[in-house]
Image (cartoon, rainbow, N blue to C red):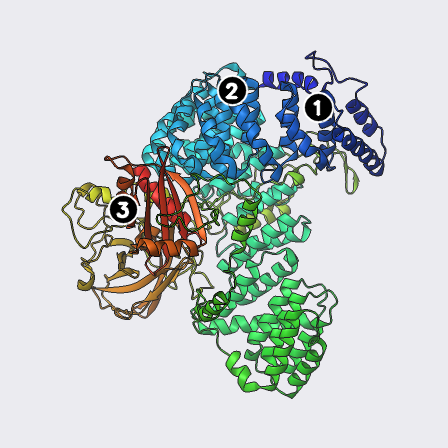
Amino acid sequence: MSDVVEKTLTALPSLLSLDSQTVATKLSSTSKLGALIRGITELRSKHEEEKLIQRELASLKDQVSSPHTSMRQMKEAMVRAIYCEMLGYEASFSYIHAIKLAQQGSILDKRVGYLAVCLFLKENHELLLLLVNTVLKDLQSTNLIEVCMALTVVSQMFPKDMIPAILPLVEEKLNHSKEIIRRKAVLALYKFYVMAPNQVQHIHNKFRKALCDKDPGVMFASLHIYLQMIKDNPEGYKDLTGSFVTILKQVVSGKLPMDFNYHTVPAPWLQIQLLRILSILGKNDKHSSEIMYEVLDESLKRAEINHNITYAILYECVKCIYTIYPNSDLHEKAAKCIGNFVISSKINLKYLGLKALTFVIQQDPKLALQHQMTIIECLDHPDILIKRETLELLFRITNAQNVTVIVEKMLEFLHQSKDDYTTIDLVGKVAEIAEKYAPENKWFIETMNTVFSLGGDMIQADIPNSFLKLLSEGFDNEEENKKLRLFAVDSYVSLLEGETRKLPQRFLQVIAWVLGEYSHLRTDLDPAKVMTLLSKLLDIRQISSETKTWVLMAMTKLCSGEASISKAQSVCEDYRSSSDTVLRQRAHELQLLSQDPALRGQLLPLHRGSETLEVDFSLSFLDAFVSEALAAGAAPYKPPHQRHEELAQEKALSLEPYELSLPINMSSYSVSGRQSPTLMSGSSGLSGDSTELSAKGSSATLKLEGVKRVWGKEGYLSKEDPVEEVAQVETLSPLSSPNQPPGAGRTLSNAAAPSETPEPQQEKLQLASSLFVGLSLQTSVCLMGQPEPTAQRFRRKAKTPNSSSSALPERVSVAPVPTSSVDNMLSHDPLEATSMLPEVTHETILPPNTEVNALLIDTANSSPSPSNGVEIPFETSENEIAKTPKHECPVRSLPPDLLGLPHTKITSLCSSQTLDVSACHVEKDDSVSLLIFTSNLSDSDMENIHFSFSTEQLQVSLSSERPLHEILKHSNAVCEYSLTVHAPAIHFQMVGTLSYESSSQSREMEFSYKLPLSSFIRPLVISTEQYGTHWLDFSNDTKQNLALVSEGQDPLTDTLNILKRKLGLHVVEVIGLEGIAACRLAQDQPCLLHCRVNAGTLAVWLRSPVPKLPDCLLYHCQRVLEET
């Protein structure tokens, strides 16, 4: 790699030189660029620089606009313009000339033109359209340099709409004889995959060919694509695990050319990329992980050179080892590596060790106990990044026993921090653990007050919203609800009686809402007093209009009594004529409601927090108004993203997958092409890594490693004072290790801290005992996102995926399911398994596999058990039947009235010693029914049974036919819920909570259930004429080229029949090379499909009135055809 850098530096003078005849000619001392650089270096102020650059830009503008400027002069002017842009001054007049320079002239002229275009323009710049034809021409050139330049531009910046026009040419370059062309083509395809994954789905097999390329550079470039694809769909590339391991073995063994070495380390960036890929493939997969153990061990052994790049490889090795299926030997070696990092005296290595420890703490909590004293030292480290990463580590090990100490340390850091990013990040963490592990009401309210005060207006909006939601929804105990709200009222009244000018706007909004809602709970508090305190907020000069709106709403709820009404009227006089329309409206509402107590009682009733509000997400009450407006000639509503998309399209060339044609029998109409209003993402990633390092912060401090400290705060340091940081090797204290005798390990070794006195050392030991309480080497540990052994104080009534907990812990068996993307969910279609079975009339459409996951919260020592996979009805293969839980569950079956409908297998969600919960879903004509089977395995009856669900995309309603309130001992019960789609998605994740009472004790269990969009798809039987009418009315669409299935003489008919059989589409009509189909969601949400055979592919165009539905359905169509 060093040779490549040297060659690049050698070639730079030829690029900037005026005389292109000599390659190694240095920058001419008489050139205008040289004069510009010398002039800038001699300046003494920013103002002088601006004057010089403005004169230079004016000169450049005249030069490039002159018709007598030669190509050599134009090239030199572009280089000067690049230099001005690098200094931060706009030279937009030169953009069009850079494109012209790339379109004509010699190779060197085109090179400078392409370079200027890459530095000047962005991907969405409108001038890039003028470069498309030039790139197309250069890609077809026989000159390798021109092809390389074109591929470089494509891989760095290219309009998304132009990808279909250039993709075939780039695809051809994968077979080029020169390795540099193949490598740049792979990088261009990687750029295409990042911008539009659906555009390159059909060439995945060619990616595999690039992975096996004989040139290591081409293979390395292909890893970028594979890393992204494996993140999206790990299960689809498990078969390549052995190939990646083989490549890593060859790299570690030094079998690559020496050109790939960096400081004698063989291809370090290639090793890092491979380790990241292996960590994803080996997660929760024992078979794949066993293939990796040997090469990971070898990587740890060989990465022993003391250099920063080897530390990076070791860090990735540690992350990979703790991500894949565990191996005790590798864990021991990785833990030793982390320990060497953590105790290092070098700041960079210490930071790396803390970051690695933060990552692995959830899998191996005993590492935190081994290094607890080092972690305590890091809390007082002078480097701010070390402190921040240490707090991130403490955040990961927070539990109900150490939450007060950890929150105290975080708040201390917030008081000292001046970085906005750190403040926003830490206040969010404090709010999260405070709500989750609050020991008492007073502590929780005071902590949140501090969070609002320190976070200021930079605080994320979801923090105050979550806090107000917690107060509004309440908990299981009404007495606790009242105590918490009363303490909040008392706290905020005290705050308003003091100085309020320095309180942030968001905090004032929270105070106003709480006092408006719950000040009536305090009987000795006069509403007039609260009205007076709130009105004082309106007099603050810095208060925003939004906060004034919150205050006026709070006053509207409190205006009872003559004094309150009088105060309300005076406020109304001030704001009835406000220029702010919202404030004016709130003032009129305050005036009207203060004079009509009966109306105020109906609109703003007290004690309404426990009522369930029914929300009409479809806004059906506006249907009549919308119909009248449309009939009067009003334009249909378009979402903002669709409007922006159409505006962008008007300025761009229209490159459709096939020429614009109309559906069958619709040639008399004219349809304007529209792009898809949404960009579908088929995967969702949730990272567990800690907050990334700020580059600005890391460069703001001096590196004083190895420098002797002579001066301190008190003056000159004596010789006996400590002069530099000493690496500390600590022994476990009896506070953390139950295996040590009572007298062992109470102090650190003298060599570790030679200058410390017993008192500070004892304080650190006490702090360690407070921070690491609850962690043990022998018991299960409660970490963020895992079951908590102690009950959570605040238990919301409306459950969310991150909420805890049951009132009474019980030992349970959790049914874990390996994580996978939606691609894996659809990778094995059940229709293929049943294609050879006799026809069953009631199973015309069978759903894809459904993934089920269960999580029980607030339980200790949970033992995992295999989960049941969802199978097709009547599938009897023993190899596909998953293991059942350890205890026997009663036999369950569908209700008689649902037996004739397509359904999934009854699958276990979660189970315990006393209860087992299973589920399946049944496909009806108008909806999907979720059946939950509950088995009481105990000797006592279960009462007050209640299921609650949390999902954003589905509407869940209880079927009145099968309510569930009580289950007798040793019996089964079934509860039916109706599911309808509110917002289309590729798959739907439902998080549910079961609460019940048994033996006079309350218990709760949490589980999750996943089902695909294809379960909701139904055929839409319409005529061709109706199809044409609907096609013109629908505004949301998307287009894509899909693979064409050739099973018989008519590929189009065969392909549509497959979509009909597997997705339930209704084929309306097929004529020649075109066909149309229609489908709907279960609640009459239609989607139309128009397809056409074009150049051996199927060009598909989908339209629907429902946003995102075309993209989601296109994804399922693509997966079905690929698997076929």
Q: Secondary structure at mark 2?
A: helix
Q: Depth check: give the residue in front, 1061 or 559.
A: 1061
Query: Which is more N-terminal, label 2 or label 1?
Result: 1
Query: Which is more N-terminal, label 1 or label 3?
Result: 1
Q: Depth check: give the residue in front, 315 or 88.
A: 88
**Quadrant that contains the N terminus:** top right
Q: Which residue is mark 2?
A: 180
Image position, residue 862 (x, y; %): 34, 51
Of tags 3 and 2, the one toward the viewer is 3
Q: Which mark is residue 937?
A: none
Type of the residue with mark 2: Ile
Q: State whether residue 732 appears in this view.
A: no
Q: Judge the density around disc 1: few (<14), some (14-19), many (≥20) Cα neighbours within 10 Å.
A: many
Q: Which residue is mark 3?
A: 1062
Image position, residue 422 (x, y; %): 62, 48
**Quadrant that contains the C terminus:** top left
Q: Depth check: give the residue in front, 830 or 1044.
A: 1044
**Does residue 1090 lie above or below 544 as drawn?**
above
Residue ID at (54%, 18%): 144
Residue sitting farthest toward the bottom: 562
Q: Which image quadrant for residue 969? A: bottom left
Q: Which residue is mark 1?
A: 75
Query: Would you say 270 lies left or right of 540 here?
Result: left
Of tags 1 and 2, the one toward the viewer is 1
Image position, residue 261 (x, y; %): 53, 18
Q: Are marks 1 and 2 in contact (CB under 8 Å)?
A: no
Of tags 3 and 1, the one toward the viewer is 1
Q: CA distance from mark 1 to mark 2?
A: 26 Å
Residue ID at (56%, 32%): 132
